[in-house]
Image: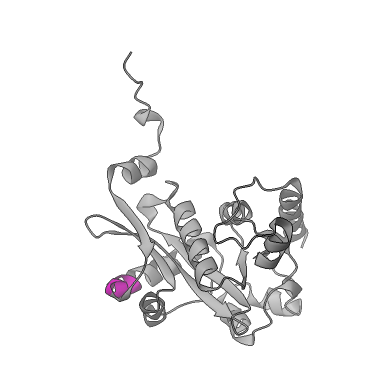
Amino acid sequence: MAEKDNSSLKSPAILLFEQRKILIREANAGDVDYATTITDEMEASAKARGTGIAKRSPDYVAQKMREGKAVIATCEDGAWVGFCYIEAWGHGKFVANSGLIVSPAFRKSGVATQIKRRVFNLSRIKFPDSKIFGLTTGLAVMKMNSELGYTPVTYSELTDDEEFWSGCRSCVNYEILMSKDRKNCLCTAMLYDPLKETKQTGLTLNKPTQAEPSKWVFERLFQNLRERISR
């Protein structure tokens, strides 16, 4: 019996992703020409969501590429698909996977999840003892983070590096953050602690666990959302 064709049930983004050969890899100096395209899309995406992100210049993104602290996705023909980079804070005690962005044509295709996993693993290799954290308002990113082993935390458990927090000044919600003495904002804070993983398993792992997010994780996420709605 011929195999049933389910292509008509797939989204245009998934079909595009399957039809074009996409390479997700560590970025390098040869990718700096994509920097302006990436930062322009970051800004446009933030405006469309009505939320803010720490603005990064093309030079900053290009430097991350040269340092091997970024992951990029491109088509075989060279078209840009997606990007994410690594930032270290507090003398390397904390690491953030920042600026996750996907070209509009490839959104909802699953490529963001693959980029996120790749940059997470790269962070574990380059900074094996660092805590990996993130601030996000997006439920999709929260889900990806929880699948990688992040858990929701209070802001007090994040880095106290002033340079990191100064990056929030370009966010439309900066006044809310400062009015709460940097203890809370509209973003949910999530943290991956390799030390806890080591204590639980007895092993130091370079790959994320594949366990399903616990009920507590989702309860904490929805509690944060309820708190935002009530403010």
Q: State yes or no: residue 119 in magenta.
A: no
> In the figure, is residue 33 to the left or right of 227?
left
Viewer can see residue 193: no
Image spot of residue 134 (x, y percent): 61, 67
Image spot of residue 67 (x, y percent): 40, 79
Q: State yes or no: residue 35 in magenta.
A: yes
Q: In the rendered image, which quarter is residue 53 located in? A: bottom right
Q: Which of 194 and 117 is in front in this view?
A: 194
Tell me the chief SS of the magenta region: helix
Q: Which span of residues is magenta-colored? A: 30-36
Image spot of residue 19 (x, y percent): 28, 42
As drawn, the residue found furthest toward the top would be: 1
> In the figure, is residue 130 to the left or right of 13?
right
As drawn, the residue found furthest toward the left would be: 77
Q: In which quarter of the image is the C terminus?
A: bottom right
Residue visible at 64% across and 56% down in the picture: 149
Q: Nearer the viewer, residue 41 or 4?
A: 4
How many marks the image carries: the answer is 0
Q: Nearer the viewer, residue 209 or 12?
A: 209
As drawn, the residue found furthest toward the front would be: 202
Q: Which of 94 and 100 is in front in this view?
A: 94
Q: In the rendered image, which quarter is residue 164 located in? A: bottom right
> In the figure, is residue 66 to the left or right of 223?
left
